[in-house]
Image (cartoon, rainbow, N blue to C red):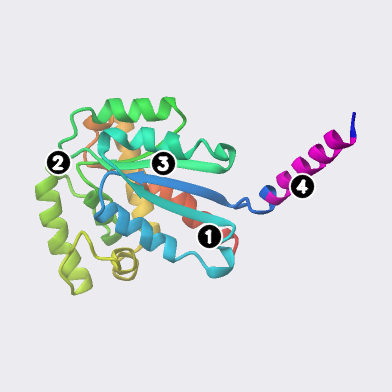
């Protein structure tokens, strides 16, 4: 092997070591949602709660695109260092016609799905100890708004940048995760096999619980 080849191989090893040093050891969460409002504000708020000394080891990146483009957006950003990235799409049942199919297709590509039925507000409801049986998105949002105002003293806004902090201070995140988990298990016991049939229900608690668990164990 010539000198040039040896030099080239050595450079490649150095690059690999440099890249390895920059890998977030606790995970690089790529979260793609279909709204600029509630979901994005929520996860941006969660991101801000990561302690400064942990931010190089636990990374959250939130992206927004159209509902039917979420999977492609995930795949696009997974082309670089896919082995280090943990992809999620987060969206609601609401009026999405292909709800079950989008979930099925995402999971077939090893993309996690944080779905909510009927809407993201049903997950946030759990912070206040409730997950009421409301299967219309508009009704769920309206009723959640009343509870949110009662618990926090402020009007509910989907674009509130402090939404996550308000939920944690006015409610209880550990209880929310437990309530959501129990609701999901109840749906399974009732032999509901499609997410569109599971209402009220969500899988967002799995994503939040995983991130929060890593933060708690490594602080």
Residue corresponding to mark 3: 88
Residue at the image position 18 percent from the left and 74 percent from the top: 153
Which one is in front, 187 or 14? 14
Q: CA distance from mark 4 to mark 2?
A: 55 Å
Residue at the image position 52 percent from the left and 68 percent from the top: 51
Tag in front: 3 or 2: 3
Residue corresponding to mark 2: 135
Tag in front: 2 or 1: 1
Secondary structure under tag 2 reads loop
**Quarter of the image with the C terminus in it:** bottom right
Going from N to C along the chain, the mark reached first, 3 or 4, is 4
Residues shaded magenta: 3-18
Which one is in front, 46 or 169? 46
**Chief secondary structure of the magenta portion:** helix
Q: Is residue 141 above or below residue 67?
A: below
Image coordinates for residue 24, horizontal then vertical, percent: 59, 52
Image coordinates for residue 159, horizontal then vertical, percent: 22, 61
Instruction: Say few, some or many: other residues with alpha carbon within 10 Å of mark 3 (under 14 / 14 to 19 / 20 or more).
Output: many
Residue corresponding to mark 4: 14
Q: CA distance from mark 3 to mark 2?
A: 24 Å
Residue at the image position 49 percent from the left and 64 percent from the top: 50
Q: CA distance from mark 3 to mark 4?
A: 31 Å
Instruction: Say few, some or many: other residues with alpha carbon within 10 Å of mark 2 (under 14 / 14 to 19 / 20 or more).
Output: some
Look at the image and say whether residue 50 sits in the magenta stretch. Answer: no
Q: CA distance from mark 3 to mark 1?
A: 18 Å
Secondary structure under tag 4 reads helix
Secondary structure under tag 1 reads helix
Secondary structure under tag 3 reads strand
Q: Is residue 63 visible?
A: yes
Tell me, yes or no, whether the two marked residues, 2 and 1, touch with CB atoms within 8 Å: no
The dot on residue 215 is: 1
């Amino acid at each position: 092997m010539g000198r040039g080849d040896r030099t080239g191989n050595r450079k490649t090893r150095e690059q690999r070591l440099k890249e390895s040093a920059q890998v977030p050891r606790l995970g690089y969460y790529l979260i793609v949602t279909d709204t600029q409002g509630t979901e994005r504000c929520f996860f941006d708020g969660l991101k801000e709660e990561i302690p400064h000394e942990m931010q190089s080891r636990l990374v959250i990146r939130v992206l927004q695109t159209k509902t039917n483009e979420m999977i492609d957006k995930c795949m696009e950003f997974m082309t670089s260092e896919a082995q280090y990235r943990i992809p999620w799409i987060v969206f609601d049942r609401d009026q999405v016609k292909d709800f079950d199919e989008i979930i099925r297709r995402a999971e077939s590509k090893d993309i996690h799905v944080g779905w909510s039925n009927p809407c993201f507000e049903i997950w946030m409801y759990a912070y206040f100890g409730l997950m009421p049986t409301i299967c219309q998105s508009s009704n769920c949002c309206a009723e959640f708004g009343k509870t949110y105002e009662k618990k926090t003293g402020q009007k509910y806004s989907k674009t509130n940048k402090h939404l996550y902090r308000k939920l944690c201070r006015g409610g209880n995140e550990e209880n929310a995760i437990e309530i959501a988990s129990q609701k999901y298990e109840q749906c399974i016991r009732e032999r509901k096999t499609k997410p569109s049939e599971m209402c009220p229900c969500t899988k967002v608690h799995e994503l939040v619980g995983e991130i929060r668990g890593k933060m708690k164990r490594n602080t």
